Image: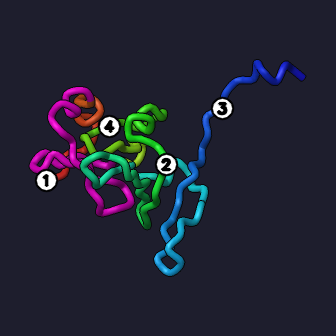
């Protein structure tokens, strides 16, 4: 057994999120699989409230979009979105939006982010 201070950091495949319970007005912690997340988003101008969005639900998360965009396989596509690229299914060039495999949810791709992700986006089927 090696020195515990020299152990390697392993990629974590689950994320601690919080579901808002309107009945009790509390947040309930839950672990969800990273692979189930379609994208992270914020709907406030300061970006202080962050959501992890799955095909069935959305959860509060205690992190920033900047931190989340550093996760392997996740890319920032707009000021308000970080996408799990493994969930991206196609691209709608009319509205500059990514479409997901298992959901009717869509995410905007801003011009500056499109340039950075162009090769990945062009590899997706076009949705017309």
Q: Which residue is mark 3?
A: 10
> Marks 1 and 4: which is nearer the front?
4
61 drawn magenta = no
Q: Which residue is mark 1?
A: 128
State the separation of the CA atoms marked 3 and 4.
Answer: 23 Å
Query: For the residue labelled by badge 4, is the local secondary structure a helix, a strand or a loop?
Result: strand
Q: Which residue is mark 2?
A: 62
> Marks 3 and 1: which is nearer the front?
3
Q: Name the residue furthest left.
A: 94
x, y (%) of residue 87?
40, 48
Please state the extent of the stretch shown in magenta in the rendering: 88-116
Query: For the residue labelled by badge 3, is the local secondary structure a helix, a strand or a loop?
Result: loop
From the viewer's perspective, tell me whether residue 17 is left or right of residue 43: right
> Marks 3 and 2: which is nearer the front?
2
State the separation of the CA atoms marked 4 and 2.
Answer: 17 Å
State the separation of the CA atoms marked 1 and 4.
Answer: 23 Å
State the separation of the CA atoms marked 3 and 1.
Answer: 40 Å
State the separation of the CA atoms marked 2 and 1.
Answer: 36 Å
Is the image coloured rainbow, by chain, by secondary structure, or in one colour? rainbow
């Amino acid at each position: 057994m090696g020195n515990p201070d020299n152990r390697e950091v392993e990629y974590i495949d689950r994320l601690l999120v919080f579901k808002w319970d309107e009945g009790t007005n509390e947040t309930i912690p839950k672990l969800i699989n990273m692979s189930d997340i379609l994208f992270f988003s914020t709907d406030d101008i300061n970006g202080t409230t962050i959501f992890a969005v799955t095909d069935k639900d959305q959860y509060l998360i205690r992190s920033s979009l900047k931190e989340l965009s550093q996760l392997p396989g996740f890319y920032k596509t707009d000021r308000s979105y970080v996408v799990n690229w493994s969930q991206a299914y196609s691209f709608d060039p009319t509205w500059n939006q990514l479409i997901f495999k298992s959901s009717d949810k869509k995410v905007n791709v801003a011009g500056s982010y499109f340039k950075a992700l162009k090769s990945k986006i062009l590899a997706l089927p076009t949705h017309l």
